[in-house]
Amino acid sequence: MQLEASINRPGEIPVSPAIRANESLHEDLTAKWFLISSISYFFIVGIVALAIAAKFVWPQLLGTIPYLSYGRLRPLHVNGMLFGWLLAADMGLSFYLVPRLCGVKLWSERLGLATVGLWNAIILSAVVSTLMGWNQGLEYAELPLPLDIAVVVAWVMFGINIFGTVATRKYTQMYVSIWYTLGTILWTAFVYLTGNFAVLFATGVNQANLNWMYVHNAVGLIFTPVGLALAYYFIPKSSNSPLHSHKLSMIGFWSLAFVYVWTGAHHMIHGPISQWLQTISIVFSVMLLIPVWAVVYNFFATMRGQWDQMRNNVPLKFLMTGVVFYLLTCFQGPMHSLRSVNAIVSKTDWIPGHAHMAVLGAFSFFAIAGCYYTVPRIFRKTLHSEALANWSYWLFLIGGVGFFVTLWLGGFWQGWQWNNPAIPFIDTVIALQPVWLVRFFSGVLMFGGIVAFAYNILATMIGTERQPSQ
Amino acid sequence: MRDYVYPSVFFAYFYFFLLMVGALFFFVRTCRDGYWGSRSEEAKYRMLVDEEEINLHRGDQDEQK
């Protein structure tokens, strides 16, 4: 209660001497460089995304140049968006929020800057390796072994810095965002090592099973927890409203921790793995509704009486739209893991529609909101343009919804056609051309959102200084 | 060529077991550290208090005086 009261009476909180002298306790160099590089990759890889969406409509595009073939551009797009943009932005935002929640400086800015340097070297090398076709041939695990090892080293550096900061925290109890960030670090270690190293020593069905465990948990145990860490931090901060229930957020965290890892095998339903393993993956997929509802209810309850802020608050628009997409994608997941639904949608365009709603619609929206919130603060600048920020929101939203819905409908249609042995496969490809045309134009809108967002943030970084009263 | 399927699968299970033990340990600790008791909501109020912004407002108030 004392803490609650102190929010309305600023000045009663002990403030460190550095802060008192109008200097920030936090240098934020690592956060700045992670955000600059991640937003740059978002733009560059966005061009690649457009190119491969265009190739669906105009297969002759870019000719027969091997470096620009679909088989090489697609892994570049996937890895570039996942690791170049989203995970790098998540790491940068973690470097911003964890020291603040702990009330101390980042454990080591020097180690953080070394992590940024190594991460950029990995991403640039990944661009070369994927374009050259040096590829392990495993979904989400395409990077060659030396780069996998470099990712592990960079992740250990990131983990040491975050754990070191948390170990020196001022407060015993950790806010839920710290729990999710620490969970991300540990779960990523498990998921990445299994998906990129253990999988190389397995063969056949066991290899496929390990690979899909990795693919699903790359989203579920890497991007989900770190994305929720951001949402749990930025929703209360942006709306200036306390979280509805911290206890409920902890229930969500622990139920995610104990449920998510079992769900990967639902990618192989009706495949050659044991029926009992398929059933386990279905049961745990449905159980995911528990952590999801705990999270989503908490966010909506936090916003009770605050919805009017959505009119002018761009970070909040991205955040709450991301929460809606999170709810939808996490409702879809359990439903299409059911055997009857899976028989139609598995391996169809439905799946990229679903995956894009999770990674772009939910987690990238959280990261974009985080960038809009943090960049003016850490660079001590005013946001370059509120209007442009609104434009970026609407472009992402309209383009995103067009993309997701088109692929769900197209995927369902495709699945029905595939289940009819009288229809030749090539006819199902021809039938989907209008779907892919809409997908391309939706992609153009989303790329417009990326351009508006990236330009706005970079212009903010080099823009005019913020006045003290702002 | 030797078959490494079982060692790799058992490696994954072993690693998973380690994480499971770690998760159980920290889950039990949350009970001790008051995450489920009457003090469980303190963290959500504390996170809203931003030392930097407090100082900024205090600086404004000082200027007005």
Image (tube, rainbow, N blue to C red):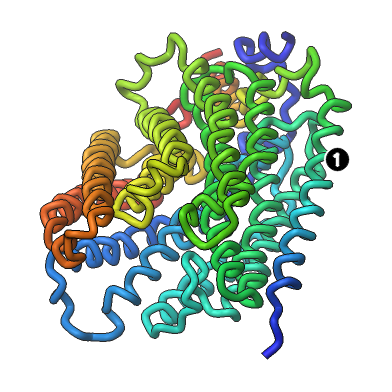
| Residue A323 against residue A166 in the figure, above or below | above
Between A326 and A177, the residue placed more toward the observer is A326
The residue tagged 1 is B25
Q: Position of residue A225 (x, y in %)?
A: 59, 42
Provide the chain ID for the residue under circle 1: B
Residue reaching furthest to the bottom: B1
| Residue A445 against residue B30 in the figure, above or below | below
Q: Position of residue B24 (x, y in %)?
A: 82, 39
Between A344 and A330, the residue placed more toward the observer is A344
On the question of residue A373 being in view, the answer is no
| Residue A6 against residue A373 in the figure, above or below | above
Q: In which quadrant is the C terminus of chain A drawn?
A: top left
Q: Position of residue A209 (x, y in %)?
A: 57, 62
Q: Position of residue A6 (x, y in %)?
A: 67, 13
- Write the residue at 52% across / 20% down: A297
Q: In which quadrant is the N terminus of chain A drawn?
A: top right
Residue reaching furthest to the right: B32
- Write the residue at 17% across / 56% down: A436
Mark 1: amino acid: Phe
Number of marks in the rendered image: 1
- Write the residue at 33% across / 75% down: A71
Q: Quadrant of residue A23?
A: top right
Horizontal relation, residue A340 to residue A269: left or right: left
